Image: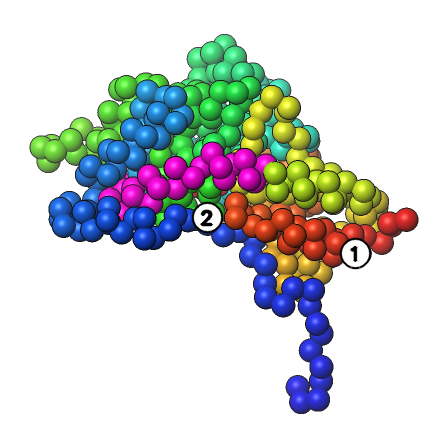
Amino acid sequence: MAGEERKKTVFKKPVPITLPTLPDPRLMFKKYKKIVDSRMITNASTVKEFEEKAASYLKVKHAVALNSCTSGLMLIMKILNLNGEVILPSFTFHATAHAVVWNGLKPVFVDCDPKTYNIDPIQVEKAITPNTSAILGVHLFGNPANVEELEKIAKKYNLRLIFDAAHAFGSKRKKKNIGGFGDAESFSLSPTKLLTSGEGGIVATNNKELADKLKIARNYGDSGDYDCEFSGFNARMSEFNALMGVETLKMLEKNVQRRNNLVKSYKKSLSNIPGIEFQCVAPADRSTFKDFSIYIDENKFGMSRDKLHDALLAENITVKKYFYPPVHGQKAFKHLQTDGRSLANTVKITDRVISLPLYSHMEENIIGRICGVIGKMCLHRT
Ligand SMILES: Cc1ncc(COP(=O)(O)O)c(C=O)c1O
């Protein structure tokens, strides 16, 4: 409006919630040209190279590249021939549950641990019925799930164990790479992930039969003779996506380290503000920190998560309510009965967490400035 002064924001330009950290395109050009010249532009030698390098990094026997993590989850469940019910957390991105539903299976949502935000093994065991065929864990925000307890339960009840490892390429559980747990783990390589191929997914497994079947499944279930063994779909990765994967894999270790340092910086700056808590990562574990989320205790902080969200957006700081609403409360899943299972931790946390900007090449001084804004918003600061 004429004459009306626009309010000055702390950041002139929006600080993004995340950005992919990408290789110099000049380094990729030669390889890009080689792919074009070969005219083999999908599912060829670069995909194979990416799979081999990913398997070697993860220290697993097999890595199968696909067009997304969701495809990976859908195809793993299809190949394992699951039926009935699959137990999974409600505090996750909705794709975890979509993969269950697309297989005609019933998602059984269970609560998360209040400290790690990951699926609670005690609740998993309580939710098992004669119809349960699998447990689908998630390493939320890159924080490794309690894989040992979940493996024990899966063994005890003869269930399949699958991990949605969308956030966790580069995470470690007690020094062991995420990727080698359960029957299979499916990673996402979309642009918000540390390892990205533009779009894509990669399934890690030590089960040769499963890996071989995945390679057929990503090609409609056709092993090459047009006589399909089962119904798959087109879940192939293109050579261009694989090239991006190969190049970002080279940068991964450095980027995981860098994220961990940036998170340390966030925690240091936020630790003296009342009413802010952090997701607990066990000291022996490593998270990728695909996201850095803080928990807001309104009474101590003096402002609700939702108000803080709006106030930070007004200062050009992009924040996200990852993941709100919880999956069991979303329109697509509301009709599913929770059969008296309490999802109290999930509801409490998803009402109160907010993800702050974080990307691997982020300058540290931005973090100080963001924390300064949050500190000023805390009404109970002495
Ligand atoms: C926990 C989780 N699972 C699955 C997905 C889906 O990944 P994709 O987009 O590669 O299918 C995501 C996407 O971010 C996710 O956060």
Of the image marks 2 and 1, the number of the one nearer the N terminus:
2
The quarter of the picture where residue 100 lies is top left
Q: Which residue is mark 1?
A: 377
Tell me which residue sits at (63%, 40%) in the image: 263
Residue 41 picture location, percent across and down: 19, 47
Image quadrant holding the N terminus, namely bottom right
Q: Say which quarter of the image contains residue 221.
A: top left
Is most of the magenta stretch helix, strand or loop? helix
Residue 241 is covered by the magenta coloring = yes
Residue 13 can be seen in this image:
yes
Highlighted magenta segment, given as a residue range: 232-260
Query: Is residue 281 toward the left or the right of residue 226 in the image?
Result: right
Distance from the alpha carbon under mark 2 to that under mark 1: 30 Å
Please say if 309 is above or below 53: below
The residue that mark 2 highlights is 21
Left or right of residue 9, residue 303 in this image:
right
- Identify which residue is drawn at 50% across, 10% down: 156
Residue nearest the viewer, comparing 305 with 361: 361
